[in-house]
């Protein structure tokens, strides 16, 4: 699916997702427990826990259910309850026109020897729906229309719009070429003009971000307003974003909050995430950890349920500011020629290169697109050469199944066994999963535990996660929340999303640990930021690299609203460089200041220093040396920033925002030199300057005439001191004359071979906040 689809279709209504989860749970016994979207059946061997503990968990489950608008169980009960009553209450269709105007339709009715349980267009060329008012149409010839001519035309128009929309979506999902995607959006534009809601959503986002359509904020705003009137949660969320960021409208945080709230009530996950961040950071609302927890937990549940064994795609967090200073270093992206070098090694039979490329293509990231076909080919080559890691990953691919690799528990088991016999932790973890869930083998919790322990001992995150889950649920082992916490912590250090999710649940409910809302929110936030919408970070980066700063800044601004610190700093960076023309000249610095502030509050050092710079120079705010000093001091104390220390030294030296103190200035300069080798040269120059200033200040403070009047040269150097001085001056003069004559006698070089002397520019004086 396209990225717009991720922004759109991923955040579908909560009801549809929770129902599907409920359907899965229904197939299992009532004693089952769900952790991280995985169902564990309680066996007879597992320890029975006390009624108090059972009641506690029931209460916690009730708490979680109350967070959603409608619990999935309630929905299914409502759907299944008293179907007969529902039929009685359903409105009776009345025939319009025909031979039985005003009479009720009869269902089923017989027409052309076929029974119809609903209105039909069969037998009519104009496509209008009709029904019979008696059972046998042929016998009684009693009929009427089910809709007016106007309703009929509207229905046919919507059907035509749906067909155009489906054509566009088919092209969009099946093609990877930009030209074909642009063609798909022409179909979607046509469907949107016909008031097709989903097409309008796709087109409005494309116009907002400049994806395959020319960016047009005003047109996207008009579409969002139209969608909002129709009650579209995606439209409400997007309109909230426009008011929050002041794009195409006058900025209004109050209106933004209203639209975000309606979007969240409609089940839009991005709106929930934005509200979670706003309550956590206190943006436009009173800070409330519990409200943030409610929104973040809801989104995290959906993100966790989408996570597969392979862990999903890798989120690339590239900082534009860091990349400008160190091109290619900070991004973690692999250069094209480096990838080609690895491909060359892999073709030559280098097993490590094959495994590495296989993993890159399996997960995607670092500039490599996810491609299961290529991953499968590389793993196959390495497995044939006897590499256990490749065998284990082939087992994972067969275990999960995809368009490329058919799902097969038997084949997966063979690969897992081969890898496990060679002591591979990935294979051991795979075998553990097979025994835990009975995939290709009978369920055996003891063997599952044994293999997970072996994998965990070797530091494999999947083994640690599953071992933690077994201790949490008391499956094949005595229930032990402390052990569960230990293994979840270990898996989280390896970056496993489900480990963060499980830890968040434990901290939110106080299971095995002291309840901590703050810790739970931070962990849930981490999980939410791994959702599919995080792929937008890479599209924004690519837009920026392609020179489309306007598209990049809008995408970063939406991600910034969702609480991504890297998006906040990147949006601020683009605004700071004045590269986005869609933002007015007068608004650039104030908006950049706002996002530097949000990024700084999430612990980004560069953003904290930038806040100091903005207050120091008066960018987007009044010049305020005291506030600048506070920001530099925070960056110095909390993040040990050499730049902040240098700036503090400069402010102490000049007495800006603080009392002038040359001794403290020297101390901060020395600290900066110790904190970073890069600061040593500017610190040396600053100290030289400080030494000169200190000397001049000292000389000013003492009376030179008085000093010389107290010195008696006859007493100090003797009565002949003037003769000694003249002799020394004559010797120095003779030395200089002799040196100059020797230089003129140097052998002249042939013309054309004289090397050009590079002109060295004097080093610029290191001003503080640059």
Image (cartoon, helix red, strand yellow):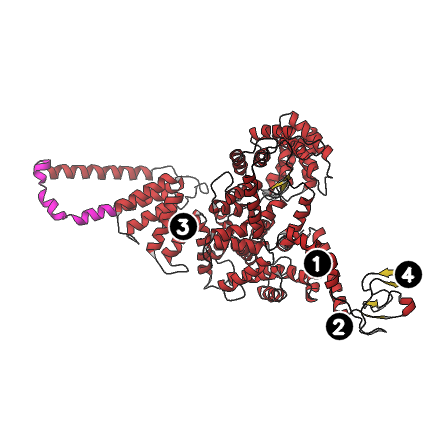
Q: Nearer the viewer, residue 656 or 328?
A: 656
Q: Nearer the viewer, mark 1 or mark 4?
A: 4
Mark pair 3, 4: CA separation: 81 Å
Any part of residue 18 in sight: yes
Residue 609's tag is 3
- Any mark on residue 113, and which? 4
Q: Quadrant of residue 40?
A: top right
SS state under label 3:
helix
The kind of secondary structure element at disc 1 is helix
Q: CA distance from mark 1 to mark 4?
A: 45 Å
How far is mark 2 from mark 4, CA to CA? 30 Å
Which numbered disc flags the more N-terminal residue, 3 or 1?
A: 1
In the rendered image, residue 585 lying in the magenta stretch gets the answer no
- Marks 2 and 4, the one that precedes in the sequence: 4
- Number of other residues with Cα within 10 Å of mark 2, as a class: few under 14, some 14 to 19, many 20 or more: few
Nearer to us: label 3 or label 4: 4
Q: Secondary structure at mark 4?
A: loop
Q: Which mark is residue 158?
A: none
Of callouts 1 and 2, the N-terminal one:
2
Outermost residue to the right: 139
Q: Position of residue 636 (x, y in %)?
A: 37, 45
Q: Residue 694 or 121: which is nearer the viewer?
A: 121
User: Residue under circle 1?
Assistant: 183
To which residue does mark 2 refer? 150
Nearer the camera: disc 3 or disc 2: 2
Q: Nearer the viewer, mark 2 or mark 4?
A: 4
**Residue 535 placement (x, y as % from top left):** 59, 49
Q: Are marks 1 and 2 in contact (CB under 8 Å)?
A: no
Assess whether residue 696 is covered by the magenta stretch. Answer: yes
Q: Which residues are magenta?
A: 691-718
- SS at mark 2? helix
Q: Earlier in the sequence, mark 3 or mark 4?
A: 4
């Amino acid at each position: 699916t396209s990225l717009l689809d991720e922004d759109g279709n991923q955040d579908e209504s909560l009801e549809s997702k929770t129902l599907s989860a409920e359907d899965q749970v229904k197939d299992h016994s009532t004693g089952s427990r769900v952790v991280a979207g995985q169902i564990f059946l309680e066996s007879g061997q597992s320890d029975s826990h006390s009624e108090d503990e059972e009641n506690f968990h029931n209460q916690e489950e009730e708490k979680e259910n109350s967070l959603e608008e409608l619990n999935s169980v309630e929905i299914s009960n409502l759907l299944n309850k008293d179907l007969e009553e529902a039929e009685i209450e359903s409105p009776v269709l009345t025939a319009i026109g025909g031979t039985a105007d005003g009479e009720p339709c009869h269902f089923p009715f017989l027409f052309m020897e076929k029974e119809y349980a609903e209105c039909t267009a069969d037998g009519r060329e104009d496509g209008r729906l009709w029904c019979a008012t008696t059972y046998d149409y042929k016998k009684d010839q009693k009929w009427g229309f089910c809709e007016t001519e106007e309703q009929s035309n509207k229905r046919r128009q919507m059907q035509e719009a749906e067909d155009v929309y489906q054509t566009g979506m088919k092209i969009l999902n099946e093609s990877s070429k930009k030209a074909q995607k642009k063609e798909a959006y022409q179909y979607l534009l046509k469907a949107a003009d016909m008031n097709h809601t989903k097409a309008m959503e796709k087109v409005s986002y494309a116009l907002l971000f400049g994806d395959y359509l020319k960016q047009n904020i005003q047109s996207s705003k008009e579409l969002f307003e139209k969608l909002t009137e129709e009650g579209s949660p995606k439209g409400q969320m997007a309109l909230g974003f426009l008011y929050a960021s002041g794009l195409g409208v006058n900025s209004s945080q109050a209106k933004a909050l209203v639209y975000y709230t309606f979007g969240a009530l409609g089940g839009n996950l991005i709106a929930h995430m934005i509200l979670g961040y706003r309550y956590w950071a206190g943006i436009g609302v009173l800070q409330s950890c519990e409200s943030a927890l409610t929104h973040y937990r809801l989104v995290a549940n959906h993100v966790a349920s989408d996570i597969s064994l392979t862990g999903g795609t890798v989120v690339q967090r590239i900082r534009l500011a860091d990349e400008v200073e160190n091109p290619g270093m900070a991004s973690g992206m692999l250069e094209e020629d480096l990838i080609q070098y690895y491909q060359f090694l892999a073709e030559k039979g280098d097993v490590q290169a094959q495994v590495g490329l296989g993993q890159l293509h399996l997960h995607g990231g670092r500039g490599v697109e996810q491609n299961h076909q290529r991953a499968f080919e590389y793993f196959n080559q390495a497995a044939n050469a006897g590499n256990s890691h490749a065998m284990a990953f082939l087992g994972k691919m067969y275990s999960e199944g995809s368009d490329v690799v058919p799902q097969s528990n038997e084949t997966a088991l063979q690969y897992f066994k081969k890898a496990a016999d060679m002591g591979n932790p990935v294979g051991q973890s795979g075998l553990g999963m097979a025994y835990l869930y009975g995939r290709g083998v009978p369920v055996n919790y003891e063997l599952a535990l044994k293999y997970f322990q072996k994998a965990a001992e070797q530091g494999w995150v999947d083994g640690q996660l599953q071992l933690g889950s077994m201790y949490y649920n008391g499956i094949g082992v005595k229930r032990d929340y402390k052990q569960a916490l230990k293994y979840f912590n270990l898996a989280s250090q390896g970056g496993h999303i489900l480990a963060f999710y499980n830890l968040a649940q434990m901290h939110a409910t106080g299971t095995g640990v002291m309840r901590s809302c703050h810790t739970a929110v931070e962990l849930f936030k981490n999980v939410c930021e791994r959702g599919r919408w995080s792929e937008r970070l890479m599209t924004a980066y690519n837009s920026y690299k392609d020179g489309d700063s306007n598209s990049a800044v809008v995408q970063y601004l939406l991600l910034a609203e969702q609480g991504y610190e890297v998006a906040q700093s990147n949006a601020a960076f683009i605004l700071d460089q004045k590269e986005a023309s869609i933002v007015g000249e007068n608004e650039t610095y104030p908006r950049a200041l706002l996002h530097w502030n949000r990024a700084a509050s999430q612990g980004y050092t560069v953003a904290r220093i930038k806040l100091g710079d903005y207050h120091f120079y008066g960018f987007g705010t009044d010049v305020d040396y005291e506030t600048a000093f506070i920001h530099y001091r925070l960056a110095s104390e909390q993040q040990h920033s050499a730049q902040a220390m240098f700036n503090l030294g400069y402010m102490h030296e000049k007495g800006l925002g603080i009392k002038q103190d040359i001794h403290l200035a020297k101390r901060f300069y020395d600290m900066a030199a110790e904190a970073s080798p890069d600061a040593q040269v500017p610190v040396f120059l600053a100290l030289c300057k400080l030494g000169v200033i200190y000397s001049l200040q000292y000389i000013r403070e003492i009376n030179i005439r008085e000093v010389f009047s107290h010195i008696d040269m006859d007493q100090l150097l003797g009565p002949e001191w003037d003769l000694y001085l003249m002799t020394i001056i004559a010797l120095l003069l003779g030395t200089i004359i002799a040196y100059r004559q020797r230089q003129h006698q140097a052998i002249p070089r042939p013309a054309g071979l004289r090397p050009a002397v590079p002109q060295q520019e004097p080093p610029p004086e290191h001003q503080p906040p640059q």
